[in-house]
Every structure is written in structure tokens, then in C-alpha cells.
Image: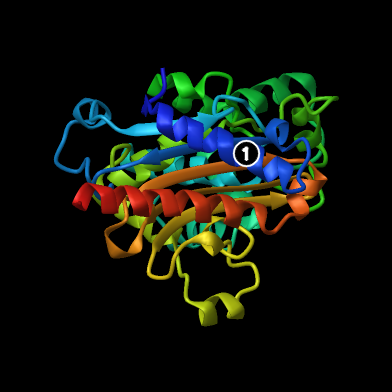
Amino acid sequence: MAFYSPDPAMGQILADLVRALELEGRPGLAQQLSITWVRYDQSLVGRAADRAPDQFWALPVQGASWAGERLRYPASVVKLVYLVAAEAWRQADLLEETPELRRALADMIRDSSNDATGLVLDLLSGTTSGPALPAERMASWVEQRQVVNRWLAELGWPELEGCNACQKTWGDGPYGREREFYGAQLENRNRLSTDAVARLLQGVMASALVSPPAGARMRAVLSRSLDPAQRAADPENQVDGFIGEGLPAGSRLWSKAGWMSQARHDAAYVEGAGGASPFLLVIFTEGQACARDTQLLPELASRLAEVCGHAAEGGRG
């Protein structure tokens, strides 16, 4: 069962939107797309700080998904998992607090640095990349590299079933022991669903996974500026071509995007302008056509943000 209560009207809106986008010139989109959309009656920011985790997760929220449980390659959205894991490790004194750790975490999220991600995963798991290893040493290395997956399993969330977060992210691809770890058919690639990412991002925004100060640090690096001048100065701003581009002026955005030759993804929490209902939106798209489609995610975000704005107006009426 999902962490949100399925809302039939929201589900119908998603289904109609996917069909409309297909008819507008995106054939096959329904199979290439996953969406999880959750709406809130008030801000999520820090909402769990004064509650026990069980109390927070029991709060009713409405949502809907399109293939939200389907496992897909998450590209750089997996960096959100590693960010939360690093804060959990710090809270348990399993990771030393250093300026270099903070620099790596910030660069991993703000700039989506693959080099920074490599360091973070090395620190989380106590492993390093390099040449192939003898079988016994490789088995030990593999065991260590599953540590984030074991932590995810301990959360006990049904949304995380089948998910895999144990690989670094790459520019050119893995080599040596890293390539061996991927499996001959890449069967050990990272795997996440939009439902799983949505629940993780909800926990981050609400400070429901780690301490409130840690939650505030994570929100700080996830915050994105929608200012046109700042976006123009940073062509890889994770707003243009993604959810942020489709939001109304005055919105506030926290997000982590992922993009490569076969995928375009984004995970975002949005607080709208003018009292619009806050919402969380995670979109995964697969295939070359989707990866190159810089208007798909903004279109989805724009139409769903409009619904949240209308819902808020109806509530005030």
C-alpha cells in the first residue's frame, strides 16, 4: 500500500494527461513514463520535526500515480538516496563530519557531480573503485557496497521493494571492479520507482528521516532558484527542461533531476504562489525520444501545478 491515499480524481487527471500527450505527438509515452503526484493541505517543510515518525507517516495525504511502482533506471536521481544515507550515517556516527564531505554532498546535489557522488558512495560503503579483484576480495567488496540497500530495507517501506541503490554514477561508464559489479547484462544497475523516490523526498522535506538540522541541510542543497538570470548563468541548472521550468512565477522548488541519453527524470517538491496547494511530483521517462524532449516534464508540471492552484482556490471558496 502506498504512503498516500489514492485519489480517484487525481488518478483520472494523470490518465487523461498521459493520453493527451500521446495524441499530441508522443506515441508510446504511456509505456515510457512513470509519475507519482502527491498533494498537501499545508507546507511539508519540517512538518515531522515535533512528531514521532509513526505519527507523521500516519497523516493522511492524497495522491495518484501512473506506473508509480515500476522500477526504472534512476540516473542521477539516485543521488537523493545517497544524500539521505550520508545524513543517516552522520547521525549514527558512522561517518566523520568534514568540510570535504559537505563539499561533496553539495556538489553531488546542486551540480549533479558524478565525481562527488563517487566519493560519497566510497565513504558510505568503505569501498573504492579500481582494477578487478580476486574472487574472495571481490565478494567482500560487493558485501560492503550493499550497505545502502541494507539501510533501505531496514526502513521497511513497501515502496522500496526491488529497489537497488549501490552503483556510482558515471560520465563514460564503469571500468574494472565497478563494471564487473554491474553484471554481464547490467542486471545490477540502480533501480528505483517514482513511488519510492516520492516517499523519500517527502521524508526529507518533512524532516521525518533524520534530525531536523539534518533535514534543513538537505533542503538547503535541494533548493533551486527559478530566477531567469540565475538560470541563464547556469545552463545545467536542473530547472530548464525539467519540472521547474513549468512552474508558475513565484513558486518555490526543491528538486533533484537526472538526465542521460536514455532517460530524463525529476523529483520535486513545490510550494506554489498565491496559496496554491503544495505538491510533490516525481517523473521518470525512458527512451531516446523522452531524453531529448525538453518540453515533456515542464508540460506535465505546468498542467498539474494548474490543478493544484485551482484546488486551493476551490478550498478558499
Observer able to see residue 197? no
Q: Is residue 12 above or below residue 313?
A: above
Q: Nearer the viewer, residue 162 or 12?
A: 12
Q: Residue at x 62, y 38 (%)?
A: 18
Placement of 137 over or under 102, stated as above or below: above
Q: Going by the image, does 294 lie left or right of 238?
A: right
Residue 274: x and y, percent?
A: 29, 64
Looking at the image, which residue is at 39% across and 24% down?
A: 155
Q: Is residue 50 visible?
A: yes
**Position of the N terminus by quadrant:** top left
What percent of the width, then of the height, locates residue 225?
A: 46, 70
User: What residue sits 78% from the left and 39% below the top?
Assistant: 27
Horizontal placement of 230 versus 219: left or right? right
Amino acid type, callout 1: Val
Most distant residue in the right direction: 184
**Image: 106 above or below 315:** below
Closer-to-camera residue (312/74): 312
From this view, report whether residue 114 is shown above or below residue 81. below
User: What residue does disc 1 label?
Assistant: 18
Residue farthest left in this picture:
50
Which SS class for mark 1? helix
Compared across the picture, whether 275 is left or right of 4 comes to left
From the viewer's perspective, is 165 left or right of 83?
Answer: right
Badge 1, how many Cα within 10 Å: few under 14, some, many 20+? Answer: many
Between residue 263 and residue 170, name the one nearer to us: 263
